[in-house]
Amino acid sequence: MIAERASRPIAVFDSGLGGLTVAAEIHRRFPGENLLFLADRARVPYASLSISLIARFAAECFDFLLAHDPKALVVACNTVSSVCLEETVARSPVPVLGVVEPTARAAAKATVNGRIGVLATKATVRRQAYDKALSRLRPGVQVFSNGAPLLVPLVEEGWTEGEIPRKVVEHYLTPIRRAGVDTLVLGCTHYEYFKDVLREVMGAEVSIINTPQVTADELGAMLRDRDELQSADHPGTVTIFSTDINEALDIVVRSLFPEPKFPDQITVHSAQIPPHRAESVRCA
Ligand code: DGL
């Protein structure tokens, strides 16, 4: 029974390509696991939508993933984690892990001077998801947040290197750097693709929390506790669904999963997400 449960896939969701960095880290750390990843690229960026629409789109995507009978659902999107994680946990028949809590826990542990920067989507900043989590985890901590709306479209466009992305990153990070933070949270999984530029702009002495890593850690601990971690004896598959497929997706998939262990270990499929009735999803 336990073996049967363990062999079910792990579902990972993001509005776009950001969460694929989390899926890649889970695959690296737990190579025996079968992964399903869904990117709702036809409707990204979510952060510019209303809260109720974000909740509705996310619920539609979760239903798509849950129909594949996963053993856990990882919400690798800070925006959705900030907007409707509680509702998702309440509706889900399997354990749900968002990215805000693991990232905030790591940041609360890492800071020495108690000043933490959060670069996030405007929706996540507005929901004060990190401010709330960090002050609960480490009372008295000071949080300096900034919304960085142009970074998600740049990633979806496949434009993560060169002068323009660097200028955009500098623009959004300058107020955070000037605040004297010693720890930086990337409060959007898309920003992982700008890691090198972010590191250059912030300087080597600032710790940048690695969301894919800390999320994979917590997922591993959760599955281990439930006796549902799959052994690495047989390499698992990675099935990537996207509501829109283009060249940028192929390039990112090839760079994050460069060496498949067998043909068709990593596959990409187009997904059609059936719409919910608007009134069927509520969120606070
Ligand atoms: N990767 C998502 C996040 O972590 C992007 C949000 C969006 O679609 O605006 O927030």
Image: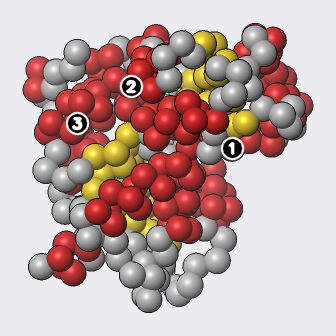
Which residue type does callout 1 highlight?
A: Tyr
Q: Is mark 1 within 8 Å of ligand 1?
A: no
- What is the secondary structure assignment of the residue under circle 1? helix
Q: Residue at x 53, y 87 (%)?
A: 262
Task: Please give left or right for residue 45 compared with residue 257 in the image.
Answer: left
Q: From mark 2 to mark 1, how far is it between C-alphas?
A: 21 Å
Which residue position holds label 1? 193
Q: Is mark 2 within 8 Å of ligand 1?
A: yes
Q: Looking at the picture, how far across and down is residue 266, in whole percent?
A: 50, 72
Residue 229, above or below 185? below
Which residue position holds label 3? 88
Q: Residue at x 63, y 50 (%)?
A: 248
Front residue of this view, candidates 154 and 127? 127
Answer with mark 3 or mark 2, whichever residue precedes in sequence. 2
Task: Please give left or right for residue 13 compared with residue 71 in the image.
Answer: right
Q: Nearer the viewer, mark 2 or mark 1?
A: 2
- What is the secondary structure assignment of the residue under circle 3? helix
How packed mark 1 is, by other alpha carbons closer than 10 Å (few <14, some 14-19, many 20 or more), is many
Front residue of this view, candidates 189 and 229? 229
Q: Quadrant of the C terminus?
A: top left
